[in-house]
């Protein structure tokens, strides 16, 4: 084999792999060859001892695994981290977030996105599905910092038809941007803020242009009840009757999904996936969490997410992985369910599928994109290792990620960010915060009234 | 003022302080003077500009707060981290933990304790309440590494009277050891493994020798039901009728505490506290968590804990703080309850009170012991700061602790451990693990049968 400039050889690590059933396992003392941004091979250390490479990474004591995917977030909202605490959802939206977002400028979004990308790279996230406003700014940060992203320009029906048109225009313009690292979706906000007619029009546009849809739906039980009261159907029923379920759709949260919704999701003509962000459900004191077990039984992938940092209050998908395991055990009353290997399955193959990249990401196998993180397990809090999957899910933390790589490009090496400079971002953002958080004007971008 | 060799001046930080009602607040751009192992002053930076000191710590961008207290753990069980995953409590005890613990030697305990102390110092824990076997070994590690600890030699009634005698002998011998950093307790295991007669004898010994008691009780709803079935009273009722509630008692877990138990706890003649370790309750899929709100209403302090790493799977009290807030909101259905400031109150004054050190620890005020951690909030995941309490509880992580100090002695500086060398511990422990985890002998130290 002839080395290319881009070749990277990672040696001496345990590699998280999947068997032909997709089950999580580990290959010990292995090596990974990365070539032209893709995984060329996962092999034995001896096989690559003489292999020339532009870069060799000695990863002894580390686990190599697919980078985490944040399947639903609003990255720029890191600027609002901690602005509205210990509140029910309605007050959180109406009294804080939506008034403040009426001040939002593209510059705020760009600075927030830059800070968010720094946070995610440091936490081992290599791809995020973002649903927000002024998304050109987010796309530009993604192009610059090297992350992968699935982006959608959000809209409410209160925006008029222009909202939907902007969402489409964004999705078409940025599809495949940043050397293919950007994929796009149409991004109606939710069935409680977008009319059936607008959802139906969105579904038509999705089909016409071959675009997926990313939206909030059935976020909690109250929304499901309100939808039944007002429309006679659940939010998932709304997605069904408006044709959204005939598109490739990523549903955020779904803690209000009912048993009756399950056949609709199972039989949906499109590819349906759900993103779960359990921290926020606990913090908002919602009575339910995403019904992961029921969704598994009907074959709907569930990806891991953080939601925005104004609710979560971080973009720590590693924590989402652990919390998903813990909360699922607790809510089902079954300690044997959602094992560490299952949690890692959600974090890898299911999250990749959720953002529509199931054929390009999610596992370290030849031909997959080289979105890889190296996790250091030598710290006292991760030793000794009796069960590698449990160590990863329940003992390791996001800060144990030492190296983050996307498309074979190293974005963080030994905890040092290589593509983003945080200090000037914080300085400029700090100066803008008083204007950003001002609520004296009495405006809000939308009203929360499920 | 004349400086002494031990003087430390910390400058430029925000200091977590308590007002005269014990409420959590922050003093900005402040300085702390440490003298002879105690806090001498929390003051303005200008006041200490010329102050001579043996060491000056520039803590700009950091928060100084009381070190975390792990109010209930079994530190040496880090050696078994990940050994028994995704199991109900009964199988966890009977098929794994208690068989393996029948192999335990003092050397295993010492190595485990050393690893655990390294983990805790790195996570900002300055004091831990330990309940285990071969506790001489733990005491010796505590003396060496500089942590503070509240130690008890555990016993079952199946040990015969010797168990209780060893527990007493340990408590008397080590009380006040390690320059006063070690306090001790009598440590019966639990009402389901220790008879009423032995609990009553323990209560007598506690009174006679002025010792507190640390034990598991009402761990979960099943135990409460079983106790009612067998004895006609709840586990808290057992503590009452055996006189344990007339001692100063630290109850681990208490997720099975009933409404009827509350008057017993409220009116207990002794000082009663409860330690909550919510991660394990989720992982074991218990139906309840510690009733923190009800305990608050009757004035019983609730300290934060991790339990042992064989269940939890870490000693990360910072995570316990966040999870306590999240799980309490979720289980009460009230997002306004257990705010970040309340979580910090549990982490500071209530945790100090829980381990009987309410007059020496828990707040950074003149005369309190200088058990201080410095938490770096400059990372992208903790910026910007709109609400310092929320940033600490919901965005910061244990790895943001940069400096850990006990009695004014720096145990970790800029993430470097100064009193423990982990590598030889891991090497020796690794060699001992096959013997430690062997279950082929068919023995177990105790039978779990609530």
Image: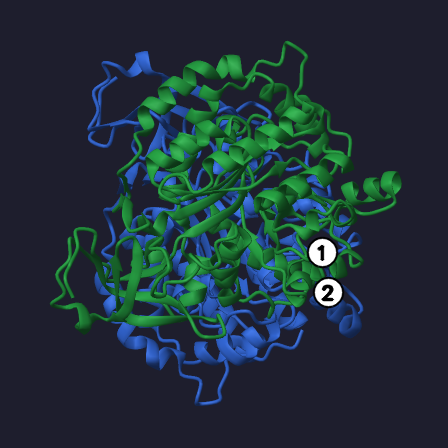
Chain colours: A green, B blue
Is label 1 in a helix, a strand or a loop? loop
Residue beneath disc 1: B257
Q: Position of residue A382 (x, y in %)?
A: 37, 59
Q: Is residue A253 left or right of residue B205?
A: right
Instruction: In the rendered view, tell whether residue B99 sits above or below residue A73.
Output: below
Q: Is residue B87 left or right of residue B289?
A: left
Q: Residue furthest bottom?
A: B441
Q: Specify the quadrant that holds the N terminus of chain A.
A: bottom left
Residue beneath disc 2: B224
Q: Residues within 10 Å of mark 1 (few under 14, many from 20)?
A: many
Residue at the location (39% across, 47% down)?
A: A126
Residue at the location (17% across, 55% down)?
A: A4
Which badge, 2 or 1, is on the more N-terminal residue? 2
Would you say the residues marked 2 and 1 are in contact, meaning their CB atoms lie under 8 Å apart?
yes
Residue at the location (36% across, 65% down)?
A: A365
Could you tell me how far apart the alpha carbons at marks 2 and 1 are, in whole angstroms?
7 Å
Residue at the location (78% across, 68% down)?
A: B228
Q: How many marks?
A: 2
Q: Residue furthest front?
A: A208
| A240 or A290, nearer to the observer | A240
Q: Position of residue B79 (x, y in %)?
A: 38, 67
| A235 or B11, nearer to the observer | A235
Answer with the quarter of the image where residue A442 lies.
top right
- Does residue A310 show up? no
Q: Position of residue B144 (x, y in %)?
A: 27, 54
- Does residue A83 show up? yes
Q: Specify the quadrant that holds the C terminus of chain A.
A: top right
Q: Chain of mark 2?
A: B
| A148 or B219, nearer to the observer | A148
Q: Position of residue A266 (x, y in %)?
A: 70, 62
Question: Label for residue A325?
Answer: none
Is label 2 in a helix, a strand or a loop? helix
């Amino acid at each position: 084999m002839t080395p290319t400039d881009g070749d990277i050889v990672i040696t001496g690590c345990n590699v998280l792999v999947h068997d032909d059933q997709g089950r999580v396992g580990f290959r010990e003392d292995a090596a990974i060859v990365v070539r032209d941004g893709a995984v060329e091979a996962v092999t034995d250390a001896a096989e690559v001892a003489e292999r020339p490479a532009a870069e060799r990474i000695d990863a002894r004591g580390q686990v190599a695994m697919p980078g985490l995917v944040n399947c639903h977030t609003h990255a720029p909202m890191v600027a609002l981290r901690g602005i509205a605490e210990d509140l029910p959802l309605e007050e959180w939206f109406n009294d804080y977030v939506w008034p403040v977002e009426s001040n939002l400028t593209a510059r705020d979004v760009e600075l927030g996105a830059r800070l968010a990308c720094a946070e995610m790279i440091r936490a081992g996230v290599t791809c995020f599905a973002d649903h927000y406003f002024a998304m050109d700014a987010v796309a530009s940060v993604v192009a610059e910092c090297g992350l992968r992203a699935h982006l959608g320009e959000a809209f409410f029906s209160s925006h008029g038809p222009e909202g939907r048109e902007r969402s489409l225009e964004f999705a078409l313009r940025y599809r495949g941007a940043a050397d293919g690292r950007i994929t796009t979706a149409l991004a109606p906000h939710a069935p409680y803020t977008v009319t059936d007619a607008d959802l139906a029009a969105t579904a038509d546009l999705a089909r016409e242009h071959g675009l997926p849809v990313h939206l909030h739906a059935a976020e909690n039980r109250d929304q499901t009840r309100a939808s039944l009261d007002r429309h006679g159907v659940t939010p998932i029923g709304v997605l069904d009757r408006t044709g959204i379920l005939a598109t490739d759709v990523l549903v955020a949260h779904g803690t209000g999904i009912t048993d009756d919704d399950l056949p609709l999701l199972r039989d949906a003509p499109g590819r349906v996936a759900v993103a779960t962000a359990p921290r926020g459900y606990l913090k908002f004191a919602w009575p339910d969490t995403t019904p992961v077990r029921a969704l598994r039984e009907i074959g709907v992938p569930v990806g891991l997410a953080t939601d925005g940092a104004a609710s979560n209050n971080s973009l720590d998908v590693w924590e989402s992985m652990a919390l998903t395991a813990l909360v699922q055990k607790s809510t089902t009353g079954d300690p044997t369910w959602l094992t560490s290997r299952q949690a890692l399955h959600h974090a890898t193959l299911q999250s990749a599928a959720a953002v529509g990249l199931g054929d390009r990401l999610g596992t370290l196998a030849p031909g997959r994109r080289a979105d890889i993180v190296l996790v250091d397990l030598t710290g006292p809090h991760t030793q000794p290792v009796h069960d590698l999957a449990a160590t990863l899910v329940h003992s390791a933390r996001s800060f144990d990620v030492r190296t983050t790589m996307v498309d074979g490009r190293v974005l963080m090496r030994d905890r040092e960010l290589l593509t983003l400079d945080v200090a000037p971002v914080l300085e400029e953002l700090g100066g803008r915060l008083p204007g950003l958080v001002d609520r004296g004007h009495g405006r809000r971008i939308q009203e929360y009234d499920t």
